Structure formats: C-alpha cells, structure tokens
Image (spheres, helix red, strand yellow):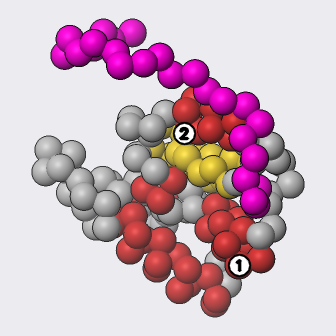
Amino acid sequence: MMSAQWKVPKAHRFAPRRDVQTRHPMLVMSSTYDPICPLSAAKRARDSFPEAKLIEVLGIGHCALSSPSMCAARLLHAYMVNGTMPEEGHTKCSRDDVPYFVDPEEKKDEEDGPKADAGSAVFVDEDADLMAALRDLSGAIPVPSFVGKRY
C-alpha cells in the first residue's frame, strides 16, 4: 500500500453514514479499475443509501463513461427516464468498445474482426446512435499525452 506523498494533517476522520434517506433511490455507477474513485468507494456509497443500486462497468478508467457499455447505458437510460432501477444490488456490465487510450486498429485480430474482449453487445439500428454518443462521451474525457493515442 502506498503512503501519502504529502504530509498534510487530517482535518477529520471519514465515517460513512448508513440509511441516508433520499426522495428517490440512488443509482451509483463505477468502472472496475478507476484510479481516482475506486470501486470500493462506489460500494460504500451504495451501502449508505437504502435501496441504492450499483452498476459496475467492467473496464478501466475514471468514471463508468470511460469504457462505453450498452448494458450500462440502457440501465442508466431506464433510471433517468422512468426511475427503473436494476434488479440486482450490484449489476456488472461488459464494455462494448476498447478503452479510450487504445487505437481502434489495435482492437482487430488477424481476421480483421473485433477481438472477443472488445465488446459483447448485439446492436440494432436504434443502438447505433446510443453507441456513438457513448464514444463521444468517453472521448470527451481529457487524456494526458503520456497515456497514448486516442481514437
């Protein structure tokens, strides 16, 4: 475990609260490997609110939008449009595109098709616009130049 790089005195000790009442159930989203807000923090947030649910995008990057996922987008859409929560307390969604720092040409195999881990969504016509929006959102996240090329 890493120690703090800067020696700054603590102002208080964090103590998560339980049973925080909200007007509507809360939906928490996170990616599996978020270097800024780890999945453990998302689980702690979910556990603080009664009836809260967690959507985990099985991917890398800060925030669930860094790895486009039709599964997560559909669940978020249902929640935002009509308040429908996922059935499970913790839903895991596969990503449907390569992480934002991988060149799209690198995601093809020798037969020039997508690799199996590049996504699991079955697309229909109405999903094309949603996937394009997800790619735009993930591409809007600033990536430092040392990380690599973006598509």
Residue 19 visible in the picture = yes
Query: What's under tag 1, amino acid-wise?
Result: Val
Residue closer to the observer: 92 or 29: 29
* Direction from residue 17 to residue 15 in the image, left or right: left
| Residue 94 drawn above or below residue 126 | above
Q: Position of residue 109 (x, y in %)?
A: 44, 57
Rendered residue at 71%/78% (across/down): 81
Q: Quadrant of residue 34?
A: top left
Q: Which residue is mark 1?
A: 81
- Check disc 1: other Cα within 10 Å, few if <14, some if 14-19, many if 20+: few
Rendered residue at 53%/45% (across/down): 31
Badge 1 marks a residue whose secondary structure is: helix
Residue closer to the observer: 34 or 109: 34
In this rendering, the label closer to the viewer, 1 or 2: 1
| Residue 57 drawn above or below residue 20 | below
Q: Position of residue 96 (x, y in %)?
A: 55, 62
- Quarter of the image for the C terminus: give it: bottom left
Q: Quadrant of residue 9?
A: top left
* Direction from residue 90 to residue 97 in the image, left or right: left
Which numbered disc flags the more N-terminal residue, 1 or 2? 2
Assess whether residue 125 is covered by the magenta stretch. no
Q: Position of residue 69 (x, y in %)?
A: 57, 62
Q: Position of residue 80 (x, y in %)?
A: 67, 72
Provide the residue span drawn in magenta.
1-25
Q: Which residue is mark 2?
A: 32
| Marks 1 and 2 in Cβ contact (< 8 Å) | no
Which residue reaches farthest right? 87
Assess whether residue 3 is covered by the magenta stretch. yes
